[in-house]
């Protein structure tokens, strides 16, 4: 059995490891975009940043603005998403389609809901749904062009969010667990599409 101090230390180490992996994955993705090896679906990245940021604000507001380390991973991801989008615009290595704008509008709608209700549950659930809508253009491109969206950042992020979800289980909260569970699913799907999917004309990693 672990004593209280050891238990707390273990959770802290797990969280710090997860945060470090998230930042490392973001660095890898930004580097690939700048090098021209990965196209940034720029509106998707900006939309994700906005949605995650809204969710963080809603959860902190619900806790009367007391800082909660359980939202730090989402805050890091929000920052990373906007940096990846900026890297794409700055390097000129980005893609944009008509559908991307429609997906981004879903994010703006979520922001409107938050401003009207300020309910962390409603905002977080709608932000995740909108986040998935914003992700559709990238999923479509990854399906059609796996190699063009292949980066080790996806499995790294998958592992990082698995660690984050595990740390939250020690102090269980469904509200805090929603984003990690969704991001585990999304990064797992992107890992599969870009590394493991095989078929006519496709080459596995």
Image (tube, rainbow, N blue to C red):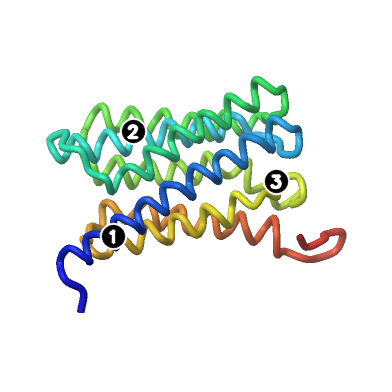
- Name the residue beneath numbered marker 3: 149
Secondary element under disc 3, as helix, strand or loop, is helix
Residue in the image at 62% along x and 40% along y: 29
Mark 1 or 3: in front is 1
Above-or-below relation of 12 to 49: below
Above-or-below relation of 10 to 54: below
Q: Percent from the top left, x then y, of residue 123?
A: 29, 40
Q: Quadrant of the image for the C terminus?
A: bottom right
State the separation of the CA atoms marked 2 and 1: 26 Å
Question: For the residue carrying disc 2, how many other residues have a C-alpha within 10 Å: few (<14), some (14-19), or many (20+)?
Answer: many
Give me the disc on residue 11.
1
Above-or-below relation of 22 to 36: below
Q: Give the residue furthest to the bottom.
A: 1
Secondary element under disc 1, as helix, strand or loop, is helix
Q: Percent from the top left, x then y, of residue 75?
A: 37, 38
Whichever of callouts 2 and 1 sits on the residue coming sooner in the sequence is 1
Residue in the image at 76% along x and 33% along y: 36
Q: Percent from the top left, x then y, of residue 112?
A: 33, 27
**Circle 2/circle 1 CB separation < 8 Å:** no
**Residue in the foreground of this view, choosing between 64 and 54:** 64
State the separation of the CA atoms marked 1 and 3: 33 Å
**Residue in the foreground of this view, choosing between 1 and 164:** 1
Question: For the residue carrying disc 3, how many other residues have a C-alpha within 10 Å: few (<14), some (14-19), or many (20+)?
Answer: many
State the separation of the CA atoms marked 3 and 2: 27 Å
Whichever of callouts 1 and 3 sits on the residue coming sooner in the sequence is 1
The answer to whether 93 appears left or right of 18 in the picture is right
- Name the residue beneath numbered marker 2: 54
**Residue in the foreground of this view, choosing between 130 and 58:** 58
Q: How many marks?
A: 3
**Circle 1/circle 3 CB separation < 8 Å:** no
Residue 56 position by quadrant? top left
Residue in the image at 78% along x and 63% along y: 204
């Amino acid at each position: 059995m672990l004593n209280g101090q050891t238990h707390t230390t273990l959770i802290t180490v797990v969280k710090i490891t997860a945060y470090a992996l998230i930042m490392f994955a973001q660095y890898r993705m930004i580097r690939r975009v700048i090098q021209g090896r990965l196209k940034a679906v720029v509106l998707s990245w900006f939309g994700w940043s906005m949605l995650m940021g809204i969710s963080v604000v809603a959860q902190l507001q619900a806790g009367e603005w007391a800082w909660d380390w359980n939202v730090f991973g989402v805050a890091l991801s929000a920052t990373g998403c906007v940096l990846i989008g900026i890297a794409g615009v700055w390097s000129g290595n980005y893609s944009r389609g008509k559908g991307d704008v429609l997906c981004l509008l879903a994010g703006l709608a979520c922001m409107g809901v938050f401003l009207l209700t300020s309910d962390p549950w409603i905002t977080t659930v709608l932000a995740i749904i909108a986040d998935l809508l914003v992700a559709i253009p990238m999923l479509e491109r990854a399906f059609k062009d796996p190699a063009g969206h292949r980066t080790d950042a996806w499995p790294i992020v998958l592992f990082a969010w698995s660690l984050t979800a595990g740390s939250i289980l020690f102090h269980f909260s469904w509200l805090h667990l929603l984003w990690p569970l969704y991001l585990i699913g999304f990064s797992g799907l992107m890992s599969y599409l870009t590394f493991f999917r095989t078929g006519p004309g496709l080459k596995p990693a």
